[in-house]
Amino acid sequence: MAHLSIIGTGNMGQAIAAVAGRGGHTVQLLGSDAAATPVAGDIVVLAVPYPAVASVVAERGASLAGKVVVDITNPLNFQTFDSLTVPADSSATAEIAAALPQSKVVKAFNTTFASTLATGKVGDLTTTVLIAGDDTDAKTALADIVTSGGLNAIDAGSLKRARELEAIGFVQITLAAGSKIAWTGGFGVVAG
């Protein structure tokens, strides 16, 4: 059994907590009012909007050393919905990994909406969480949490693949914001 700390209590934080709970894992939810509360989990999920990540890292960076840190952000321009806000050769996850060199940073959950995590379905398909990172053990630990919670997990490759996962998340969000797909839907993966 794993112990997660989720920084952020919004829809995504709540949905990830529910997935972990279904798998029998313990969860510590930390809201913005819990800055003084120590991070207890071995796996820490950053379930905050991308613009809030810098302050979370500044406040809690030292306490994240040695932990698996899961970045779920999509660094898009929420005013225009027309671009990602990180350099074309980078990703939000790469920036977080650079700021937390003693943590094992992975990208996950950014290509799913909270509703598909909560229901475990994208249409008729089981929700799939794509995971990217350079630490195999960190990815395996997160995949075990995801699958024990009833979802599918796919290793999407190294940390460099976070850029492509952020592009997928960007397209999905802009489609939903433009009412072309529902916020209760999204992309599904058929593995055959």
Image: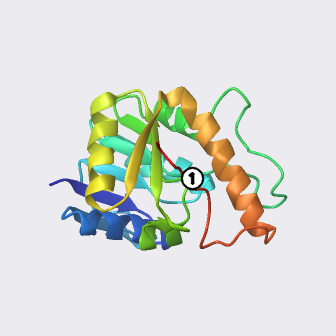
164 or 121: nearer the viewer? 121
37 or 150: nearer the viewer? 150
x%, y% of residue 127?
46, 60
Left or right relative to 171: residue 66? left
- Please tell me in which quadrant of the rendered image residue 21 appears: bottom left
Residue at the location (23% across, 63% down)?
Answer: 23
Q: What is the tally of numbered marks visible in this picture?
A: 1
- Please tell me in which quadrant of the rendered image residue 81 appears: bottom right
Residue 40 visible in rendering: no
Q: Quadrant of the N terminus?
A: bottom left
x%, y% of residue 151?
37, 58
140 versus 28 height, above or below: above
Colour basis: rainbow
x%, y% of residue 61?
39, 43
152 versus 120 height, above or below: above
Element on which disc 1 rests: loop
Q: Which amino acid, by three-letter code, is at mark 1?
A: Thr
Left or right relative to 18: residue 127? right
64 or 82: nearer the viewer? 82
x%, y% of residue 71?
48, 47
Residue 160 visible in rendering: yes
Residue at the location (55% across, 47% down)?
Answer: 54
- Please tell me in which quadrant of the rendered image residue 34 appears: bottom left
Residue lying at the far front in this picture: please name it. Answer: 192
Residue at the location (34% across, 51% down)?
Answer: 44
The residue at which mark 1 appears reads as 111
Characterize the local packing of mark 1: few (<14), some (14-19) or many (20 or more) Cα atoms within 10 angstroms.
Answer: many
